[in-house]
Image: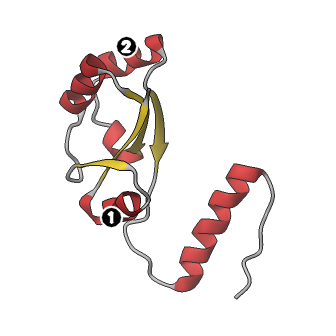
Amino acid sequence: MSKLLVITYPDTSLGFNLAGVEVKEVQEGEDITAVLNDIVKTGGYGLLAIEEKLLTKVDEGILKRIRKTGIPVIVPINTPKSWHSEVEMESYIARLIRRAIGYQVKIKR
């Protein structure tokens, strides 16, 4: 059975851990090519949610190999570094919901 793995920064890993998702923490700017190579060799993961900025440093060869096989599926995510205000957080969540369901949702308090 395939599993989900989230590759993200230590600051944002707690939320994924609380949701019961397996998380691999990496530092900002780290090259995760070796991590992806290990994942592809061992298998077991069907979906990888990876911080978008981390994907920019990954060797193109491994990404082509993953795309060719189709597994694991890589979903780039972009978690905010910090919440400056409640309004910013609500705006971010509303945008995520709109992308997911295709409708604008107004969040009421």
Specify the amino acid type for callout 1: Leu
**Tag shown at residue 14:** 1
> Mark 2 packing: few (<14 Cα in 10 Å), some, or many (20+)?
few
Secondary structure at numbered mark 1: helix
Instruction: Give the labeled residue for mark 2.
Output: 65
**Tag shown at residue 71:** none
Residue 85 screen position, x and y as percent = 50, 85
| Residue at 27% from the left image edge and 35% from the top image edge | 57
Residue 60 screen position, x and y as percent = 33, 21
Q: Is residue 67 left or right of residue 53?
A: right
* Residue furthest bottom in the image: 109
Residue 103 screen position, x and y as percent = 81, 58
| Residue at 46% from the left image edge and 42% from the top image edge | 76
> Mark 1 packing: few (<14 Cα in 10 Å), some, or many (20+)?
some
Secondary structure at numbered mark 2: helix
Specify the amino acid type for callout 2: Arg
